[in-house]
Image (cartoon, grey):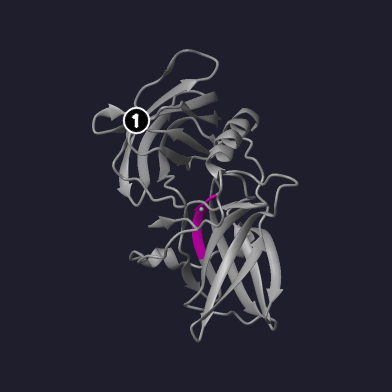
Amino acid sequence: MNLYSRVGTVGGVILLLLAFSVAFSASSCTGDHSKKNGKNATDFILPKESDLVRIADTVWDVTNYTVYADAKLNNKYHTIYLRLRDTSGIPINDKSLDFYPEMSMGRMKHGGPFEHPVALGEGWYRGPMVFIMADIPQMGKGWQLHTIRSHNRIKDTLAIKIPVTAAATMRTMSSGTRDDSRVFISCLLPDSVKQGKHPIRFLMNKMDGHHFPVLDHYVIKLKTNRSTAEAGASENFAAESTGNGYYEGTVNFSMPGRWEVIVELWKAGKKSNQDDIKYLVQVI
């Protein structure tokens, strides 16, 4: 999967992002189109509406746009679904449809990593994206899902407000690196898991001006510790690239309790991350 970002007027957003990242860790931009990679048949399975969380709903130009997600939106990785129907409830399948996230902070705007949506049929579209920060009250419109539809070479864009709140447990963090400037690392592990071994996945993106290209040439070394004890667990296996910015490894939680997954980014045999990266996990 190829991930991109769209950015509007930026002007100093990097410093703000770093400040907000620190604040959220304690308490809690627009890109180019490119080719879509091939998909497996299972990638086109229609979702069950009852399994999703409705995020927003609006009507524009006799079309009903309903936004769903895998969960209530926080500043982390999410799968977004968009459903299109006419005012009679008939599904609308539009091959030209695209969407992307954008954060408006008044005079400044930025995006985040995202993937072009897959058309699932029956009016459904799906695409993952990363919200790299939460909405900021009284500072702009916050996050919006911009949808694009083309007709007779004319593009229409609709901005749909989607509320994003600060995650109780951080799952998207950033760090300076030796070779790739600032990167964002999203951990896809749930906040709570059962005792034992678990596969763990990450998505890594580089902040490159207005864009967030994926990074594939790292090894993510993993260490697990109980937050209430110095002793950790063995049998952790480093996360290696599976392509398109994704990494997969294995972590072992040997007993219940509050654990932390300590991440180190290695490239060309050298440690690369300049900031500490830790993810908290409740093991039951």
Residue 191 in magenta stretch: no
Q: Residue 7's spot in the image, x, y percent?
A: 52, 56
Residue at 51%, 25% in the rendered image = 259
> Given the current orientation, which residue lies at the most extreme bottom position?
152
- At horizontal 38% and vertical 67% (from top left) the residue drawn is 41
Q: Is 111 in front, or is 114?
A: 111
- Dividing the picture into quadrants, the one containing residue 236 is top left
Q: Is residue 179 above or below residue 61?
A: above
The reply to whether residue 256 is visible in this rendering is: no
The image quadrant of residue 170 is top right
Q: Quadrant of residue 31?
A: bottom left
- Which residue bears the numbered disc 1? 272
Question: Which secondary structure dominates the residues rendered in magenta?
Answer: strand
State the SS at label 1. loop
What type is the residue that disc 1 sits on? Ser
Asked if residue 240 shows in the view, the reply is yes
Q: Which residues are magenta?
A: 126-130
What residue appears at the point 36 percent right and 39 percent down from the top-left corner? 180
Quadrant where the C terminus sits is: top right
Quadrant showing the N terminus: bottom left
Q: Where is residue 152 shown, x and y percent of the image?
A: 50, 87
Vertical position of residue 265 compared to residue 47: above or below = above
Q: Residue furthest front?
A: 11
